[in-house]
């Protein structure tokens, strides 16, 4: 069997869902489990309901929920059989309205935001299961929440692999073996007590990988709106090329540093069993896409060891200077303890003679982090930065590559160069507004286009 995941743009409207039906039909012999995202833009639109809730604007809230439901109604209208999903969607929207009306005038808590954000996947999966049935594909809608058991870190919950493996096997295998196609939700899960959670934005890829590992799938297909993993984001570098093959490590590095095409954790559950991930374009299903697997033969593009360039905006650099602590045992540990205590994830690290620079993406707990770091030394923070990552084959060990890279980046100023341990990437920090230009110049330098 295989797991086939369809992202937001691949289920955006009736035409996209029509393509999905064709793709799923072409995979029948592979016995797919289908994982879907919310209709494109739906998760953002749902989360935006927190605005009228906090403002106590019941009328605006009603209107906004109505518009979201209407989008599903309009999509169903053009898909044979899909309208049978609408009563369930309308009922759930009614439930959502009552839940949110109970919170009018206040800020939604993380647990409530998860319950809200997850509606997009619940509704899209109902629509798609009904549309598949309408097209004579034997499909069964499956609620993933009792299967995808997670901890209670709302907004970025961690799944419990042993439990979800047992439950996925118990619930999904009989369907697969019975010749039915399970259609289920990416992104969402629930705690053991049944409280809704989410795996973090873009988390549907991760869901697909978790189910692929649990069910020992032959491969996990990620259907999206580009031809695969590319040498750069094609929105920034239109001439970017598609990698035919990639390693898990490359995929993870690229995703961690901003290549949105895969959630950073996607490869992780699949490494042990060596299950391949194939990234495919739902608009051009005949294209081969990118296969990510352990034995991948990594081609050299543009005769350079560089394989891809990614970047991530919205980065804050935190600098700590502690001359008195220089060499003091425990300084780094004390510093990391601060980040750990506030559960703030650190990406790039560079340490100089007397100072340490770290990058963080999540600013919600930054004030508390800065306050606590203040006890260790002088702290200053720079907002509006971006991390650029150049990923390739052993590039840290390639003579002259760093010099070539920093020449190409000019006139942008490189602020922090990571001394991280990965042999396959070099990362550095630039000002956010310089990011796209830097990516384009690096692409020109290493790929000639
Ligand atoms: P989906 O909704 O299918 O999950 P996403 O929008 O999450 O799709 O991810 C696909 C997008 O990732 C592409 O449209 C592309 O702009 C972006 N992207 C960023 N970096 C890369 C890269 N290196 N290769 C391919 N796509 C990339
Ligand atoms: N719909 C969710 C999001 O927009 C999850 C996903 O698409 O992967 O983040
Ligand atoms: Mg995505």
Image (cartoon, rainbow, N blue to C red):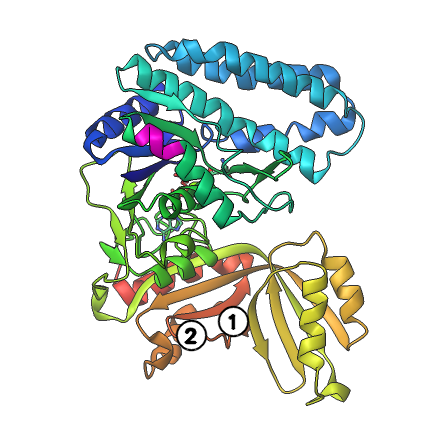
Q: Is residue 383 left or right of residue 310?
A: right
Q: Which sits in the foreground, 166 or 24?
A: 166
The C terminus, quarter of image: bottom left
SS category of the residue bearing label 1:
loop
Q: Residues within 10 Å of mark 2 (few under 14, many from 20)?
A: some
Q: Residue 334 at x, y = what percent?
A: 72, 75
Q: Main secondary structure of the magenta part?
A: helix
Identify the magenta region: 172-176
Q: Residue 100 at x, y = what percent?
A: 71, 23
* Residue 178 visible, this orientation: yes
Residue appearing at x 45%, y 13% in the figure: 85
Residue appearing at x 39%, y 45% in the figure: 214
Q: Is residue 174 left or right of residue 125?
A: left
Q: Which sits in the foreground, 102 or 430?
A: 102
Q: Which sits in the foreground, 55 or 182?
A: 182
Q: Are marks 2 and 1 in contact (CB under 8 Å)?
A: yes
Quadrant of the rendered image containing residue 321: bottom right
Instruction: Report how many numbered discs are placed on residues in the image.
Output: 2
Question: Cα distance, mark 2 to mark 1?
Answer: 8 Å
Residue appearing at x 55%, y 12% in the figure: 90
Q: Residue 219 at x, y = what percent?
A: 28, 46
Q: Which sits in the foreground, 396 or 309?
A: 396
Note whether 166 is above or below 429 in the view shown.
above
Note whether 150 is above or below 119 in the view shown.
below
Quadrant of the rendered image containing residue 193: top right
Could you say which disc has been placed on residue 140 in the image? none
* Residue 36 visible, this orientation: no
Q: Residue furthest bottom?
A: 327
Residue position marked by numbered label 1 in the rendering: 414
Residue position marked by numbered label 2 in the rendering: 406
| Quadrant position of ligand 3 | top left
């Amino acid at each position: 069997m295989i797991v086939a995941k369809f992202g937001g743009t691949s289920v955006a409207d009736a035409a996209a869902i029509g393509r999905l039906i064709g793709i799923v039909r072409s995979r029948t012999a592979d016995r797919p489990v289908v994982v879907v995202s919310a209709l494109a833009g739906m998760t953002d639109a749902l989360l935006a309901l927190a605005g009228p809730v906090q403002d106590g604007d019941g009328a605006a809230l009603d209107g906004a929920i109505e518009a979201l439901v209407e989008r599903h109604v309009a999509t169903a209208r053009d898909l044979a059989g899909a309208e049978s999903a609408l009563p369930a969607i309308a009922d759930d929207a009614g439930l959502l309205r009552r839940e949110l009306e109970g919170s009018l005038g206040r800020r939604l808590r993380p647990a409530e935001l998860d319950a809200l954000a997850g509606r997009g996947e619940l509704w899209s999966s109902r629509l798609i299961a009904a549309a598949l049935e309408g097209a004579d594909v034997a499909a069964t809608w499956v609620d993933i929440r009792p299967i995808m058991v997670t901890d209670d870190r709302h907004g970025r919950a961690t799944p419990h692999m042993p439990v979800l493996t047992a439950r996925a096997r118990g619930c999904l295998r009989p369907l697969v073996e019975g010749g039915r196609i399970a259609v289920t939700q990416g992104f969402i899960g629930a705690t053991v007590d049944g409280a809704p959670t989410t795996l973090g934005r873009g988390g549907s890829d991760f869901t697909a990988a978790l189910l692929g590992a649990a069910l020992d799938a032959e491969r996990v297909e990620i259907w999206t709106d580009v031809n695969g993993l590319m040498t750069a984001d094609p929105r920034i570098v239109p001439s970017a090329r598609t990698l035919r093959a990639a390693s898990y490590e490359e995929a993870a590095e690229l995703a961690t540093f901003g290549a949105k095409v895969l959630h950073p954790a996607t490869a992780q559950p699949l490494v042990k069993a060596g299950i391949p991930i194939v990234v495919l374009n739902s608009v051009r299903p005949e294209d081969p896409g990118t296969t990510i697997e352990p034995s991948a033969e990594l081609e050299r593009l543009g005769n350079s060891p560089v394989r891809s360039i990614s970047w991530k905006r919205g980065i804050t650099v935190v600098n700590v200077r502690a001359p008195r602590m220089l060499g003091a045992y425990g300084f780094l540990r004390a510093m990391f303890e601060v980040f750990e205590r506030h559960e703030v994830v650190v990406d790039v690290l560079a340490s100089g003679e007397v100072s340490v620079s770290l990058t963080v993406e999540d600013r919600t707990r930054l004030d508390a982090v800065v306050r606590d770091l203040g006890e260790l030394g002088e702290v200053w923070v720079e907002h509006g930065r971006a991390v650029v990552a150049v990923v390739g084959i052993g590039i840290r060990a390639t003579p002259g590559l760093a010099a070539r890279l920093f020449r190409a980046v000019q006139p942008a100023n490189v602020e922090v160069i990571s001394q991280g341990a990965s042999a396959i990437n070099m990362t550095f920090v630039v000002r956010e507004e310089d990011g796209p230009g830097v990516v384009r110049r690096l692409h020109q330098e290493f790929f000639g286009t």
